[in-house]
Image (cartoon, rainbow, N blue to C red):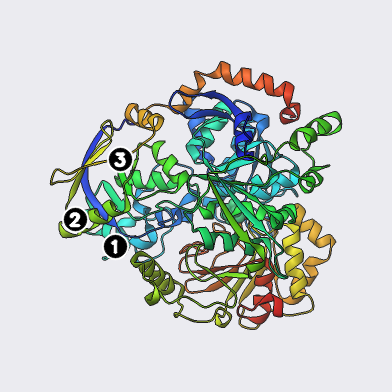
């Protein structure tokens, strides 16, 4: 038999039945549920008089709407409060495990899944959220779905799916100092474009990916969706298995041994064929900064804002001109001349413990610049927050002038009060720089945690390697 | 769900690539726990000059006169013509809900983002993929003739222009069938409940750790 890719192995293991038209009914092992995309799904169940197929396959948490300041008084915004209350009610009614807003385990859904060992290698993992792709780093098939599919998965424990094409992105060699997982994935998106992965399941491989921690791998898989792919994944190795050991939802004893034996098979076979292969030389990757309103609009830190008039492709010229207008930038401005108003270190891309450590190392013993109106650190989960506090990172940040917040999505999308005001410019460790993403008229530049930290101290973008 | 077979309507041109779901329906409207009522806030930031919040009376808000959907005859459009990678970004199904609620039945673009494309079918909205050059040509035709209409035939998989030109499009059989019949996908899947149970039993033996409560 010809070798199979990791994606094909995961696919084959979850087919309940093949439909006549080429789609398949796939079994879903784990569904993560959050407050924004689930109310209409539960409502649908109720209207149809249906019950969840398997309540224990679901894990719920509120993350998008929750305040990151003191929560003891509850949520001030009544509309946000209703949405979070609705999740609480639905979980109670249907017996679904939920980490409530004041539970120390609460956090961003894609951070807590792996952190709890609730998402494991070999699983099919879905959530009504496009960044579910994050969890493919575990050697799993993890993808975002819409609310109708949330309802479908709740009611049937399956989804009707069309098999994707497969793409291998192999990043080989040694990345230079100061180059992080975030820079690797921004560079990849800059290379293949935001639609480059459309229709594909991406597997990331190569020595530079292998050498990353689980946190770094999650950062890479997280932004697969920004590259147009629904899921990104990385083969299981010892790093994966070590990460999972002893997590609360992970198997133990004999089942652990059994699981590990199976997980070790979760990699693409040497003779497996991909539909597309992209090679990237890690040594050429520089710290990245996005300048525009699409994640593909990135340049290395020593680059400049592009000049739309030099673009020969008309669509690109228009898109660039529009982006520059929105971003309030002049063509050919060096990136290091861009001054900032706010700094956001957080989101499911970069709010795990290693991200906070990297940022803290940069700001230690320094102060944020006078022009920075707000610099905030929002840990990915309550447990990340606690770990960071145990290591004294909160003090490092606070002494430098950062605000130290409670866990949640926060200013990644500003559904809670954490938002940019019109015209404000932010260095953000999140994943989307779309118009209005962090607040209407807000201007987002995507960077790594270390680069955001360095920018906070300098007041403008700087090369963290020269810092 | 409402079945979709044929549709003819006014085409609104939105000549931009990478229109993301945040642009289609900004996040503040995602706080609703309902499926309906998003139409007034479709493309909110492009459509209005002020900042929109849920629960406002949109008829009182200052409109951006340059935005296509604020102009006659496009305010009555039911077919949206857009640039490539339409619907990229988040998985929010609020995006197709808002498009549908506004009155759109058909979207035409050179490409759509995956999750968005899939979500359209769950809501009786037909996304049609046509080659970039064809879409480009349609933009020029709409520009030359406001009120330009296209006729879409799902069973025949064609789009017909006013001059009678027939453009064929591809669509996978399952999605076509579901949309044509307006079927409840969950109901269909539950017809295979025995297969799901049989799968579960086998997996429980092979991979018991997946079933720990
Ligand atoms: S942190 Fe941002 S990208 Fe991640 S789930 Fe929350 S809103 Fe979405």
Question: Of label 2 and label 1, which has the lower sequence position?
Answer: 1
Residue placed most toward the observer, A467 or B191: A467
| Residue at 43% from the left image edge and 69% from the top image edge | A323
> As displayed, is residue A231 above or below residue A177?
above
> As displayed, is residue A135 above or below residue A155?
below
Mark 3 and mark 2 residues within 8 Å of each other at the beta carbon: no
Query: Secondary structure beneath disc 3?
Result: loop
Residue underneath mark 2: B141
The C terminus of chain A: image quadrant: bottom right
Q: Are marks 3 and 1 on the same chain?
A: yes
Near mark 3 (Cα within 10 A), the count class, few <14, some 14-19 or many ≥20, is: some
Disc 3 from disc 1: Cα separation: 29 Å
| Residue at 49% from the left image edge and 43% from the top image edge | B33
| Residue at 61% from the left image edge and 19% from the top image edge | B197
Residue underneath mark 1: B67
- Relative side of A174 to B177, left or right: right
Residue underneath mark 3: B169
**Which chain does tag 2 point to?**
B
Near mark 1 (Cα within 10 A), the count class, few <14, some 14-19 or many ≥20, is: some
Query: Secondary structure beneath disc 1?
Result: loop
Question: Of label 3 and label 2, which has the lower sequence position?
Answer: 2
């Amino acid at each position: 038999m010809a070798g199979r890719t990791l994606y094909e192995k995961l696919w084959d293991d979850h087919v309940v039945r093949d439909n006549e038209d080429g789609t398949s009914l796939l079994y879903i092992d784990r569904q993560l549920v959050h407050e924004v995309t689930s109310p209409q799904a539960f409502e649908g169940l109720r209207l149809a008089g249906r019950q969840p197929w398997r309540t224990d396959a679901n894990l719920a948490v509120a993350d998008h709407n929750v305040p990151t300041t003191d929560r003891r008084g509850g949520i001030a915004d009544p509309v946000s409060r209703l949405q979070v209350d609705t999740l609480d009610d639905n979980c109670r009614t249907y017996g679904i495990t939920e980490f409530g807003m004041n539970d120390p385990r609460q956090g961003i859904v894609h951070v807590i899944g792996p952190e709890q060992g609730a998402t494991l290698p070999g699983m099919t993992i879905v959530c009504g959220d496009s960044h579910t792709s994050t969890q493919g780093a575990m050697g799993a098939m993890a993808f975002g779905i819409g609310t109708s599919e949330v309802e479908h998965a709740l009611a049937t424990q399956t989804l009707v799916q069309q098999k994707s094409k497969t793409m291998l992105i192999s990043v080989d060699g040694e990345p230079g100092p100061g180059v992080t997982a975030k820079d690797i994935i921004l560079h990849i998106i800059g290379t293949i474009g935001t639609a480059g992965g459309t229709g594909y399941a991406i597997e990331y491989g190569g020595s530079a990916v292998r050498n990353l921690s689980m946190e770094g791998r999650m950062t890479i898989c997280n932004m697969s969706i920004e590259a147009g792919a629904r899921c990104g994944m990385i083969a299981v190795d010892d790093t994966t298995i070590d990460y999972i050991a002893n997590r609360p939802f992970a198997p133990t004893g004999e089942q652990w041994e059994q699981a590990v034996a199976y997980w070790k098979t979760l990699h693409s076979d040497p003779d497996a064929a991909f539909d597309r292969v992209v090679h990237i030389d890690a040594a050429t990757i520089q710290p990245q900064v996005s300048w525009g309103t699409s994640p593909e609009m990135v340049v290395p830190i020593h680059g400049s804002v592009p000049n739309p008039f030099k673009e020969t492709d008309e669509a690109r010229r228009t898109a660039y001109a529009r982006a520059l207008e929105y971003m309030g930038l002049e063509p050919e401005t060096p990136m290091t001349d861009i001054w900032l108003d706010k700094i956001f270190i957080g989101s499911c891309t970069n709010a795990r413990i290693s991200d906070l450590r990297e940022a803290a190392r940069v700001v230690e013993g320094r102060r944020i610049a006078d022009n920075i109106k707000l610099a905030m650190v929002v840990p990915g989960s309550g447990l990340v927050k606690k770990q960071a506090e145990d290591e004294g990172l909160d003090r490092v940040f606070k002494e430098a002038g950062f605000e130290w917040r409670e866990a949640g999505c926060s200013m990644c999308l500003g559904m809670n009060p954490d938002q940019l005001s019109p015209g404000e410019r932010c260095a953000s460790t999140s994943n989307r720089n779309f118009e209005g993403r962090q607040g209407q008229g807000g201007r987002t530049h995507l960077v790594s945690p270390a680069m955001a930290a360095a920018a906070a101290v300098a007041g403008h973008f700087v090369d963290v390697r020269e810092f | 769900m409402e079945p979709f077979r044929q549709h003819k309507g006014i085409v609104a041109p939105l000549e931009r690539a990478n229109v993301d779901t945040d642009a289609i329906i900004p996040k503040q409207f995602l706080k609703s726990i309902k499926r309906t009522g998003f139409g007034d806030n479709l493309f909110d930031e492009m459509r209005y000059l002020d900042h929109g919040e849920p629960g406002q009376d949109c008829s009182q808000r200052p409109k951006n006169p340059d935005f296509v959907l604020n102009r006659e005859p496009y305010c009555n459009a039911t077919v949206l013509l857009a640039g490539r990678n339409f619907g990229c970004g988040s998985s929010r199904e609020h995006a197709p809900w808002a498009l549908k609620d506004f009155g759109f039945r058909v979207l035409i673009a050179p490409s759509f983002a995956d999750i968005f494309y899939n979500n359209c079918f769950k809501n009786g909205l037909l996304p049609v993929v046509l080659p970039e050059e064809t879409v480009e040509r349609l933009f020029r035709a709409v520009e030359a003739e406001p009120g330009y209409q296209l006729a879409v035939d799902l069973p025949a998989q064609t789009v017909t222009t006013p001059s009678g030109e027939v453009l064929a499009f591809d669509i996978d059989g399952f999605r076509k069938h579901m949309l044509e019949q307006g079927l409840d996908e969950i109901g269909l899947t539950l017809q295979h409940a025995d297969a799901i149970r049989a799968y579960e039993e086998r997996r429980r033996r092979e991979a018991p750790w997946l079933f720990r409560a």
